[in-house]
Amino acid sequence: MGWSTNEMAQKVAMDIFDGAYVNLGIGIPELVADFIPEGREVIYHTENGLLGMGKVATEANQDPELVNAGKKYITAIPGAAYFHHADSFAMIRGGHIDICVLGAYQVSEEGDLANWSTGNPNDIPAVGGAMDLVAGVKTIYVITKHCTKNGASKIVKECSYPVTGKNVVSRIYTDLAIIDVLDKKLVVKELAPNVSFEELQQQTEAILHRS
């Protein structure tokens, strides 16, 4: 029931417009780059200092000085630009990045995002650039499994984990549905195959609305 991880990434890729400057978070968001439709140009930004990120490097062409924010070996497209870390964040904070795709621990019904900590004191702090991204990028998409491994909904009334940003998420892509955040309400844009609205609501803590 529902979409595979690759199908989720493909759904996000279809919604990225031609010529967009895009930052992809670590994990599932990285898959989005593999599904941009042919003929559509997307310029990828990584906050450690590269605009024009290419595909993940193969073992044969790995460069130890060319990695993304997740420390994966990558390539650069022709015309790519390298710059200081501070300049990279100036691009983010200045509103020059069009779309950011991030993972999430929780998203609230008002579009609040929690994606950097579960609040466990034993976890390593990992806020990275997330707070800057959600504050400075024009559009925030979240891609995540609808529920945790324990079956708890990630789409909640209020975030119980430390919040990365308030009212920042525009759209949520899960294995069960695509959900827009409109006027602090969650509106179901598309249901995954074999998923009814009623079944989706049963697996969602927050209140959903039909489009």
Image: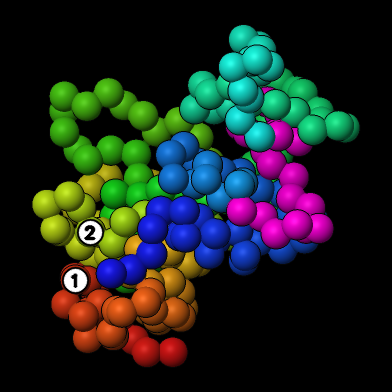
User: What type is the residue that disc 2 sits on?
Assistant: Cys
Would you say residue 197 sits in the magenta stretch? no
Q: Nearer the viewer, residue 34 or 108?
A: 34
Which part of the image, by quadrant, shows the C terminus? bottom left
- Relative placement, left or right, of 121 versus 44 is left
Residues under labels 2 and 1: Cα distance?
7 Å
Is residue 96 visible in this depiction of the protein?
no
Q: Nearer the viewer, residue 158 or 179?
A: 179
Residue 112 locus on image (x, y percent): 37, 60
Q: Which residues are magenta?
A: 35-54
Query: Which badge, 2 or 1, comes first in the chain's sequence?
Result: 2
Q: Which residue is mark 1?
A: 203
Q: Are marks 2 and 1 in contact (CB under 8 Å)?
A: yes
Q: Is residue 183 above or below residue 124?
A: below
Q: Which residue is mark 2?
A: 147
Residue 130 locus on image (x, y percent): 47, 40
Which part of the image, by quadrant, shows the N terminus? bottom left
* Residue name at image x 56 percent, y 50 percent: 32
Identity of the residue furthest to the top in this view: 64
- Relative placement, left or right, of 32 versus 102 is right
* Residue name at image x 79 percent, y 52 percent: 41
* Residue name at image x 48 percent, y 67 percent: 171
- Relative placement, left or right, of 29 versus 148 is right
Name the secondary structure under disc 1: loop
